[in-house]
Amino acid sequence: MTPHSTRIDVVMHAIRTGIASRTYLPGMRLPSVRAQAKTMQLSVSTVVEAYERLAAEGIICPRPGSGFYVTGPAAPLALAEIEPRQDRDVDPLWISRQSLETDVGILKPGCGWLPASWMYEAGMRRALRAMARADTVELAEYATPPGLPALRLFLARRLAATGIDVPAEQIMLTESGTHAIDLICRFLLEPGDTVLVDDPCYFNFRALLKAHRVKVVGVPYTPAGPDIEAFGAALQAHSPRLYITNSGIHNPTGATLSAVTAHRLLKLADHSDLVIVEDDIFADLETSPAPRLAAFDGLGRVIHIGSFSKTISASLRCGYIAARADWIDGLTDLRIATSFSGGRLAANILLTALTDSGYRKHMDTVRLRLAEAMDQTLPRLEALGITPWHVPRSGMFLWCRLPAGAEAPAVARACLQEQMVLAPGNAFSHSPDAGRYLRFNVAQSMDGRVFDVLARALRG
């Protein structure tokens, strides 16, 4: 809405937003004129006029003695219109678009991945050359429903090294980590269910959950994991169906789950119907492995997912789900129904790259570079009055508080004008204090221009 919008325009915009976000579906009765007037603190006559104008446009229709109803068909789902509404300049989908669509010369200290030059390019090229010589079947045929058997067997051995004992038959390949969560949500959730997330949490969790039309409840996160008292209270108050978290390197804080917190969390979950989704896509960036909920739980109520887009290639879309056998069976059927088959070629390339002799050395180098980047980024941010909430043991993320008086959305907009994309805290959290935080990717903060642009933005 513009600053010159009338009160009638405000009501009409609210109704259109509700229809676009599918809060109001075709045939649904709108709030009564009096109820809407009370909710919006406007006069009844204002709401009457707004409803009448919407009816004249054919968006809603009156039914004498009953009220106003939405006409059909259902509007295409508009995720950006789903409440709570945030400034489009800083909402999760906008940040993702800016990070993905901008030119390579744009500074991206707010993005969630390593620079292209840090990825496993040499191993990818070797894998591509090997696949160019593969049998025609490997290049042209569909994959088996759960995915390439050899890769699933490799993943089973890899997970066993972290204490997660799972046979290859209980692993299903997906197109990515996000695809894995989407399938799980389709499999286990109904519109209106409640899902717990960390506060703050990875912003695309929130965006994805919006698409599934569920209620999202945040649980405050600490340097050792979720606040256990708040977690228990949320279980009692909301009876959530899912909890989605990172047990290893947490996004956006960089914190790691402690063994004590993990045990207490699972003990609380034992008295509920909660299913836990453990997103482990940063596993290879850890210098010392954190506890895994799936290892303690034995994949009873925990579903473990991962991918390699952060370490090998974001262009190679391949992830996985490890879960109990009956759920994998149902998820496999769901995957066939929604995408028919996975990428056989991508799975083969990924397996070749992961088993390449150079991958271990490559990751040793990446972890060393990240540690150096962390050591260099921290003092440069602190010189600007930007302080870390927590200093991570490993990984790429810093969750930082801005100096007094600075607001992350305003700083982000100012930096965007100078061709730099930031990740403001209110995209990761709905807490009142979130607008004072920014997430920084230390690997993307090595260019000195990042701090020059930040300094100008903070001066206002």
Image: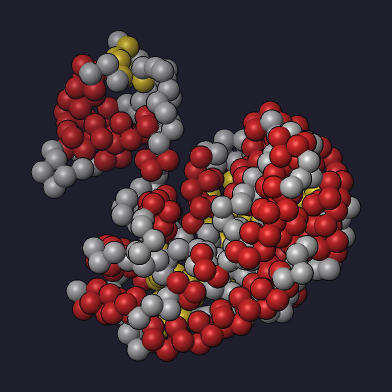
Asked whether 385 or 174 is in front, the reply is: 174
Residue 346 visible (yes or no)? yes
The percent position of residue 162, horizontal first and vertical second, equals 80, 68
Q: How many marks?
A: 0
> Which residue lies at the image location 25% right of the left edge and 66% below the top edge?
418
Q: Relative to residue 86, is residue 158 drawn left or right?
A: right
Which quarter of the rendering shows the N terminus?
top left
Q: Quadrant of residue 416?
A: bottom left
Colour scheme in use: secondary structure
The percent position of residue 245, horizontal first and vertical second, equals 63, 60
Asked whether 333 or 119 is in front, the reply is: 119
Which quarter of the rendering shows the C terminus?
bottom left
**Name of the residue lying farthest toward the left:** 4
**Name of the residue lying farthest toward the top:** 64
> Which residue lies at the image location 37% right of the left edge and 32% below the top edge?
20
**Name of the residue lying farthest toward the front:** 133
The percent position of residue 450, horizontal first and vertical second, equals 34, 75
Above or below — where is 122 with respect to 92?
A: below
Residue 224 visible (yes or no)? no
Q: Quadrant of residue 7?
A: top left
> Which residue lies at the image location 86% right of the left edge and 61% below the top edge?
157
The percent position of residue 155, horizontal first and vertical second, equals 80, 57
> Which residue lies at the image location 42% right of the left edge and 28% below the top edge?
76
Q: Relative to residue 322, is residue 419 drawn left or right?
A: left
Q: Relative to residue 230, is residue 358 drawn left or right?
A: right
Above or below — where is 194 with respect to 404?
A: above
Asked whether 7 or 85 is in front, the reply is: 85
